């Protein structure tokens, strides 16, 4: 990219499996709330309706969330790496665009939680000298994430530090 580092839309999509990973996350979070309500509803007969009705409502909300939210998130989240910077765009209601100049990168890590491993995905975390915190690229194919971490390490090694 010529002309330096500037805020612009990143070009790369996440791996499509990220949608299934997000659905699984919504499902787990929904189950954490719904299962105890179901158990209590089945065990405490006088208060059965007080537990089962909210459980049913929350289960429907969780199901709708698992169907609707991941495709929406997939359309929003983007990333790109150039010789000058790492670009990301994410968020849900408030979109966050981040540019991390190579000269400001301190560490590059890959992380794989249990659900990510199940879907063959990883997260690349780029720690910078920024008060805004690390830049994360979630939902990458595991091999792609490893290659990206290597590429970022090479580029940052070859990039002179920022004088500021």
Image (spheres, rainbow, N blue to C red):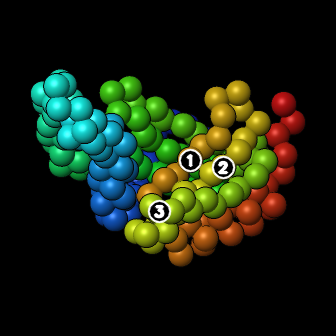
- Residue at screen point 30% across, 50% down: 27
Q: Position of residue 38 (x, y in %)?
A: 23, 40
Residue 110 vertical position relative to residue 48 in the rendered view, above or below? below
Q: Is residue 150 left or right of residue 58?
A: right
- Residue at screen point 56% across, 66% down: 145
- Residue at screen point 56% across, 47% down: 136
Could you tell me which secondary element the residue under label 3 belongs to? Answer: helix
Mark 3, mark 1: which one is toward the viewer?
A: 3
User: What residue sits right under mark 1 in the picture?
Assistant: 136
Image quadrant where one finds the C terminus: top right
- Residue at screen point 64% across, 29% down: 132
Disc 3 crowd rating (10 Å Cα; few below 14, some 14-19, many 20+) is many
The residues tagged by marks 1 and 2 sit, at their Cα atoms, a distance apart of: 6 Å
| Labels 3 & 1 near each other (Cβ < 8 A) | no
User: What residue sits right under mark 2 in the picture?
Assistant: 126
Residue 15 vertical position relative to residue 72 in the rendered view, above or below? below
User: What residue sits right under mark 3 in the picture?
Assistant: 116
| Labels 1 & 2 near each other (Cβ < 8 A) | yes
The residues tagged by marks 3 and 2 sit, at their Cα atoms, a distance apart of: 18 Å
């Amino acid at each position: 990219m010529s002309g330096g580092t500037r805020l612009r839309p990143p070009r790369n999509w996440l791996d499509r499996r990220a949608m299934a990973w997000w659905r699984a996350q919504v499902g787990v979070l929904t189950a954490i709330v719904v299962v105890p309500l179901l158990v209590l509803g089945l065990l405490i007969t006088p208060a059965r309706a007080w537990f089962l009705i909210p459980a049913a409502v929350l289960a429907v909300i969780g199901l709708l969330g698992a169907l609707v939210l991941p495709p929406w998130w997939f359309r929003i989240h983007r990333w790109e790496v150039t010789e000058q910077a790492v670009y990301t765009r994410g968020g849900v209601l408030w979109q966050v665009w981040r540019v991390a100049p190579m000269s400001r990168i301190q560490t590059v890590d890959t992380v794989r939680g249990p659900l990510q491993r199940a879907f063959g995905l990883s997260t690349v975390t780029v720690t910078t000298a920024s008060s805004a915190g690390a830049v994360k690229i979630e939902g990458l194919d595991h091999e792609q994430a490893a290659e990206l971490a290597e590429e970022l390490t090479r580029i940052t090694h070859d990039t002179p530090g920022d004088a500021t």
